[in-house]
Amino acid sequence: MDGRNFIRRVKQVVRDAAIEDTIEVLQLPPGRSPSNNIKKQSDWYRSLSPEDRKFLTEAIANAVDRGIFGLLCVLDGVRVVENGEVKGTFELNYVKDGRTLLNATDAPMLHDLYNDPEV
């Protein structure tokens, strides 16, 4: 696995699943006793027109994209999570039949790959 394959998988199993799962919960809250908050959100969602539901789905996708992008920026070291002069770094390794550093400094940055329409 390399950075490109990792980002493809993240888009499938994290991004797309988060969007779909959120919409599914809004359409039909899970469980026998969903929280009042979820029930209210579901009632509100079901009251929306099809066009408004589409806009909401796009807004949810935008929020998911921004969250993933921000996390990838942290992993790439372009967004810091520490104060002070000396900061640590993150290393994201894929381990299977060896070890591959997915966010190596000489490889394309993961956050750039995430925004690449060809990935």
Image (cartoon, rainbow, N blue to C red):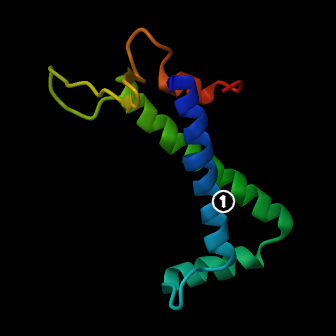
Q: Residue at x 55, y 40 (%)?
A: 10
- Quickly name the residue at label 1: 20
Identity of the residue furthest to the top in this view: 106
Q: Residue at x 57, y 39 (%)?
A: 9
Say above or below: 93 vs 43: above
Say above or below: 44 vs 90: below
Estimate the x, y position of residue 1 in percent, counting from the top left: 50, 27
Crowd rating for badge 1 (residues with CA inside 10 Å; few <14, some 14–19, many 20+): some
Label 1: which secondary element: helix
The C terminus appears in which quarter of the rendering? top right
User: Residue 109 vs residue 91: left or right?
Assistant: right
Say what amino acid the circle numbered 1 marks. Glu
Estimate the x, y position of residue 79 in percent, counting from the top left: 36, 28
User: Residue 107 vs residue 112: left or right?
Assistant: left
Quadrant position of residue 20: bottom right
Q: Residue at x 52, y 32 (%)?
A: 6
Nearer-the-camera pick, 86 or 105: 105
Nearer-the-camera pick, 114 or 13: 13
Estimate the x, y position of residue 117 in percent, counting from the top left: 70, 27
User: Residue 104 vs residue 112: left or right?
Assistant: left
Nearer-the-camera pick, 83 or 18: 18
Quadrant position of residue 57: bottom right
